[in-house]
Amino acid sequence: GDPYWANVVLLVGNDNQPDGTTTFDDQSGSNHTITTTGDAQYDTAQAPTGMTSSCVFDGTGDRLTAANSADFKFGTGDFTVELMLRASALGSAYRIFFQCADDGSWSNGWTFDFTPTPNLEWYPTLSVGGTWNVDTWYHLAVARSGTSLKMFKNGVEATSATNSTDLQPTRVLSIAGESTSSSNYQFTG
Protein backbone atom coordinates (compact mmCIF):
# COMPACT_ATOMS: atom_id res chain seq x y z
CA GLY A 1 0.00 0.00 0.00
CA ASP A 2 0.80 3.66 -0.20
CA PRO A 3 1.97 5.01 3.19
CA TYR A 4 0.57 8.45 2.24
CA TRP A 5 -2.87 7.23 1.10
CA ALA A 6 -4.58 8.86 4.11
CA ASN A 7 -3.27 12.23 2.88
CA VAL A 8 -4.75 11.93 -0.64
CA VAL A 9 -7.60 14.46 -0.93
CA LEU A 10 -8.48 14.10 -4.64
CA LEU A 11 -7.99 11.22 -7.05
CA VAL A 12 -9.71 11.60 -10.43
CA GLY A 13 -9.21 9.58 -13.57
CA ASN A 14 -9.32 6.20 -11.98
CA ASP A 15 -8.48 3.31 -14.27
CA ASN A 16 -10.68 0.62 -15.83
CA GLN A 17 -13.58 2.83 -16.88
CA PRO A 18 -15.63 1.82 -19.95
CA ASP A 19 -14.99 3.79 -23.15
CA GLY A 20 -17.20 6.89 -23.38
CA THR A 21 -18.08 7.05 -19.68
CA THR A 22 -18.79 10.68 -18.72
CA THR A 23 -19.14 10.25 -14.95
CA PHE A 24 -16.02 10.99 -12.94
CA ASP A 25 -15.61 10.12 -9.28
CA ASP A 26 -13.16 11.17 -6.62
CA GLN A 27 -11.58 7.91 -5.48
CA SER A 28 -9.93 9.49 -2.43
CA GLY A 29 -11.43 9.30 1.03
CA SER A 30 -12.63 12.90 0.61
CA ASN A 31 -15.21 11.88 -2.01
CA HIS A 32 -15.46 15.31 -3.69
CA THR A 33 -18.23 15.66 -6.28
CA ILE A 34 -16.76 15.99 -9.78
CA THR A 35 -18.77 17.93 -12.37
CA THR A 36 -18.22 17.28 -16.07
CA THR A 37 -18.46 20.14 -18.60
CA GLY A 38 -18.54 19.57 -22.34
CA ASP A 39 -17.94 16.04 -23.53
CA ALA A 40 -15.02 15.09 -21.26
CA GLN A 41 -15.00 11.32 -21.00
CA TYR A 42 -12.97 8.17 -20.47
CA ASP A 43 -11.19 6.73 -23.48
CA THR A 44 -9.75 3.24 -23.88
CA ALA A 45 -7.78 4.08 -27.05
CA GLN A 46 -5.07 5.81 -24.98
CA ALA A 47 -3.88 4.96 -21.50
CA PRO A 48 -0.60 5.08 -19.58
CA THR A 49 1.33 1.82 -19.31
CA GLY A 50 -0.43 -0.57 -16.98
CA MET A 51 -3.80 1.17 -17.26
CA THR A 52 -6.76 0.54 -19.55
CA SER A 53 -8.36 4.00 -19.84
CA SER A 54 -7.71 7.71 -19.41
CA CYS A 55 -9.65 10.98 -19.34
CA VAL A 56 -9.90 12.66 -22.73
CA PHE A 57 -10.51 16.36 -23.42
CA ASP A 58 -11.01 17.71 -26.95
CA GLY A 59 -10.17 21.34 -26.19
CA THR A 60 -13.65 22.69 -26.92
CA GLY A 61 -15.13 23.46 -23.52
CA ASP A 62 -14.29 20.18 -21.79
CA ARG A 63 -13.21 20.29 -18.17
CA LEU A 64 -13.83 18.77 -14.77
CA THR A 65 -14.52 20.84 -11.66
CA ALA A 66 -14.77 20.26 -7.93
CA ALA A 67 -16.22 22.75 -5.45
CA ASN A 68 -13.70 24.76 -3.49
CA SER A 69 -12.63 22.91 -0.37
CA ALA A 70 -10.26 23.27 2.54
CA ASP A 71 -8.53 20.24 0.97
CA PHE A 72 -7.29 22.45 -1.89
CA LYS A 73 -6.09 25.29 0.34
CA PHE A 74 -2.48 24.20 0.75
CA GLY A 75 -1.64 27.24 2.86
CA THR A 76 2.10 27.33 3.55
CA GLY A 77 2.23 23.58 4.15
CA ASP A 78 3.49 20.57 2.25
CA PHE A 79 1.62 19.27 -0.79
CA THR A 80 1.95 17.22 -3.97
CA VAL A 81 -0.02 17.62 -7.21
CA GLU A 82 0.67 14.93 -9.80
CA LEU A 83 -0.75 13.52 -13.00
CA MET A 84 -0.13 11.51 -16.13
CA LEU A 85 -0.48 13.74 -19.21
CA ARG A 86 -0.57 13.10 -22.96
CA ALA A 87 -1.15 16.21 -25.06
CA SER A 88 -2.56 15.98 -28.59
CA ALA A 89 -1.31 19.49 -29.38
CA LEU A 90 1.19 21.93 -27.84
CA GLY A 91 0.42 25.16 -29.68
CA SER A 92 -1.72 26.84 -27.03
CA ALA A 93 -1.60 27.63 -23.33
CA TYR A 94 -3.39 24.92 -21.37
CA ARG A 95 -4.59 24.93 -17.77
CA ILE A 96 -3.99 21.43 -16.44
CA PHE A 97 -5.11 22.31 -12.89
CA PHE A 98 -6.41 25.75 -12.00
CA GLN A 99 -7.63 27.48 -8.86
CA CYS A 100 -7.48 31.19 -8.06
CA ALA A 101 -9.26 33.88 -6.03
CA ASP A 102 -12.90 34.83 -6.68
CA ASP A 103 -11.80 38.08 -8.33
CA GLY A 104 -9.60 36.13 -10.76
CA SER A 105 -6.38 37.31 -9.14
CA TRP A 106 -3.42 35.08 -8.38
CA SER A 107 -2.83 36.62 -4.96
CA ASN A 108 -3.49 33.28 -3.28
CA GLY A 109 -4.14 30.83 -6.12
CA TRP A 110 -2.18 28.30 -8.14
CA THR A 111 -2.13 26.78 -11.60
CA PHE A 112 -0.30 23.96 -13.36
CA ASP A 113 0.00 24.96 -17.05
CA PHE A 114 1.47 24.08 -20.42
CA THR A 115 2.45 27.18 -22.38
CA PRO A 116 3.12 27.59 -26.13
CA THR A 117 6.91 27.76 -25.71
CA PRO A 118 6.39 24.86 -24.63
CA ASN A 119 7.00 25.08 -20.92
CA LEU A 120 5.42 23.36 -18.00
CA GLU A 121 4.69 25.97 -15.34
CA TRP A 122 3.55 26.00 -11.75
CA TYR A 123 2.35 29.43 -10.72
CA PRO A 124 3.73 30.82 -8.58
CA THR A 125 7.45 30.12 -9.05
CA LEU A 126 8.42 27.23 -11.39
CA SER A 127 8.88 26.75 -15.13
CA VAL A 128 10.44 23.87 -17.11
CA GLY A 129 11.24 24.06 -20.81
CA GLY A 130 12.92 21.37 -22.83
CA THR A 131 11.56 18.82 -25.23
CA TRP A 132 7.87 18.00 -25.13
CA ASN A 133 6.24 15.72 -27.67
CA VAL A 134 2.61 15.30 -28.61
CA ASP A 135 1.09 11.85 -28.18
CA THR A 136 3.64 10.98 -25.48
CA TRP A 137 2.78 10.13 -21.87
CA TYR A 138 4.52 12.14 -19.14
CA HIS A 139 4.34 11.73 -15.37
CA LEU A 140 4.36 15.26 -13.92
CA ALA A 141 4.44 16.39 -10.31
CA VAL A 142 4.92 19.47 -8.17
CA ALA A 143 5.73 18.98 -4.50
CA ARG A 144 6.50 21.34 -1.65
CA SER A 145 8.19 20.23 1.55
CA GLY A 146 8.87 23.04 3.98
CA THR A 147 9.92 25.88 1.68
CA SER A 148 11.43 23.63 -0.99
CA LEU A 149 9.21 23.53 -4.09
CA LYS A 150 10.18 21.01 -6.80
CA MET A 151 8.83 20.03 -10.20
CA PHE A 152 9.34 16.52 -11.55
CA LYS A 153 9.11 15.19 -15.12
CA ASN A 154 8.99 11.40 -15.41
CA GLY A 155 10.30 11.00 -11.86
CA VAL A 156 13.32 13.25 -12.36
CA GLU A 157 13.60 16.61 -10.63
CA ALA A 158 13.40 19.21 -13.39
CA THR A 159 13.59 22.43 -11.37
CA SER A 160 13.24 23.75 -7.84
CA ALA A 161 12.81 26.99 -5.93
CA THR A 162 12.29 28.32 -2.45
CA ASN A 163 8.61 29.01 -1.91
CA SER A 164 6.38 29.72 1.10
CA THR A 165 3.37 31.25 -0.69
CA ASP A 166 0.19 30.96 1.35
CA LEU A 167 -2.08 29.18 -1.14
CA GLN A 168 -5.70 29.90 -0.16
CA PRO A 169 -7.70 29.84 -3.44
CA THR A 170 -11.43 30.50 -3.32
CA ARG A 171 -12.75 29.45 -6.76
CA VAL A 172 -13.68 25.95 -7.81
CA LEU A 173 -10.85 23.60 -8.73
CA SER A 174 -10.77 23.13 -12.49
CA ILE A 175 -9.06 20.32 -14.42
CA ALA A 176 -8.21 20.69 -18.16
CA GLY A 177 -9.42 24.26 -18.48
CA GLU A 178 -10.14 27.47 -16.65
CA SER A 179 -13.23 27.56 -14.45
CA THR A 180 -13.97 31.17 -15.40
CA SER A 181 -14.67 30.45 -19.07
CA SER A 182 -15.71 27.60 -21.31
CA SER A 183 -13.03 28.51 -23.87
CA ASN A 184 -9.96 29.78 -21.99
CA TYR A 185 -6.89 27.57 -21.86
CA GLN A 186 -8.70 24.34 -22.75
CA PHE A 187 -6.47 21.26 -22.72
CA THR A 188 -6.45 18.90 -25.71
CA GLY A 189 -5.31 15.40 -24.88
Image (cartoon, rainbow, N blue to C red):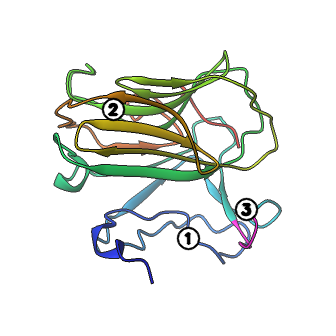
Q: In the image, which residues are magenta?
A: 49-53
**Which residue is rendered at x = 42% and y = 77% of the image?**
2
Residue 113 magenta-drawn?
A: no
**Which residue is rendered at x = 34% and y = 71% of the image?**
4
Q: Nearer the viewer, residue 121 or 163?
A: 163
User: How far is the residue under mark 3 from the one under mark 1?
Assistant: 12 Å
Q: Is residue 184 visible?
A: no
* Sequence-wise first label, 3 or 2: 3
Q: Residue flagged by tag 3: what amino acid is it? A: Pro
Q: Residue flagged by tag 2: what amino acid is it? A: Trp
The residue that label 2 is drawn on is: 110
**Which residue is rendered at x = 48% and y = 63% of the image?**
12
Local secondary structure at mark 1: loop
Rendered image quadrant of residue 147: top left
Mark 3 nearby-residue class (10 Å; few <14, some 14–19, many ≥20): some
Q: Residue 65 at what x, y percent from top left? A: 40, 49
The residue that label 1 is drawn on is: 14
Local secondary structure at mark 2: strand
- Quadrant holding the C terminus: top right
* Sequence-wise first label, 3 or 1: 1
**Which residue is rendered at x = 25% and y = 37% of the image?**
171
Q: Nearer the viewer, residue 78 or 180?
A: 78
What's the magenta bit mostly, secondary-structure-wise?
A: loop
Q: Residue furthest bottom?
A: 1
The residue that label 3 is drawn on is: 48
In the depicted structure, whether residue 35 falls above or below residue 106: below
Q: Residue 43 at what x, y percent from top left? A: 73, 62
Q: Residue 60 at what x, y percent from top left? A: 64, 35
In the depicted structure, whether residue 66 falls above or below residue 105: below
In the depicted structure, whether residue 95 falls above or below residue 78: above
- Tell me if 44 is positioned left or right of 10 in this view: right
